Image (tube, rainbow, N blue to C red):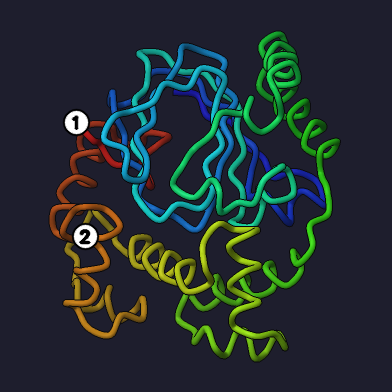
Amino acid sequence: MQYVSRVPQPPLDGLIDDLYYLEGTSPYARLTLPPMPAAFLVLNLGAPFRIRAGTDTEAVEYADGCVVSTPTRAVEFGYPRWTRSVGVHFKPWGPASFLPMPAAELCDRPVTVEQVWGRPATAELRDRLASADGPQEMLTLLEHELLRRLCDRAGLGLVRHTSGVLEATGGVVAIGDLSASAGVSGTHLAQRFKELVGVTPKRLARTYRFAAAVFAIDPAGPVDWGEVAGGAGYFDQAHFGHEFRAFTGLTPTRYLDVRRRFLREHPGHTLDGWPLPAD
């Protein structure tokens, strides 16, 4: 599988972790993405894929692509045999500058790119991407489109700053301290987060803490779960286990088994990091 990515130029780099190009055969027909402190946009250039998100019991087909705001539940992707796409990995607050609706409306409810940017504009962009001369030109086209669509959002500076504190502390910070240091009420901060991130500061803090725990796990070696839990700021191992099941649907030990399966069956694969086999 070919994966090409790069960080965009300012000011996009304050909203986006990277732009990427992906092409090839998915390692599994279905992959599960546990909740993460991030959001993403996919412009699909191949056969349709399917997504099951939030409380959905059935997967929904997406042909043009999708936009997923910071989730609170796992998202399951069903891939065609051969997949090809260009996309954006946003910081949690990143999509807000490109959305015509509050991010809260998208929480655990992916939408098509057409629903965000309109059918004619989306079709035209996908045509230009499909006819571009290689991945780097495609990423440049996408970057220019994002720069063209970039708009200011009220409260974005506040959300970026407080989200930065959450990231720097791995989510281990009192939310009351966040609002007090920012000079706003807890209610005002929560409203801004819901509007621009899609979740409250408390929920985002939980996601950062969970991500810190996951990235501390080395699936290639023995794991001390008490050490992982303590290092990520969990009160005790029982609380850690409860949160882990809430975010993944798996116990920590079962998660480790699945992660090791991925490593064993696809050593060095591009997608070995966050997705989990769902089948």
Within 10 Å of disc 1 (Cα), the crowding (few <14, some 14-19, many 20+) is few
Element at label 2: helix
Q: Nearer the viewer, residue 20 or 65?
A: 65
Front tag of 1 and 2:
2
**Mark 1 vs mark 2, CA separation in Å:** 18 Å
Q: Nearer the viewer, residue 154 or 10?
A: 154
Residue 87 place in picture, x, y as percent: 60, 32
* Left or right for 46, reference 257: right
Where residue 161 sits, quadrant-wise, is bottom right
Residue 273 place in picture, x, y as percent: 38, 46
Mark drawn on residue 116: none
| Amino acid found under the numbered disc labelled 1 | Asp
- Mark toward the start of the polypeptide (1 vs 2): 2
Residue 17 place in picture, x, y as percent: 63, 50
Residue 266 place in picture, x, y as percent: 28, 32
Q: Which residue lies under the disc numbered 1?
A: 279
Q: Which residue lies under the disc numbered 2?
A: 245
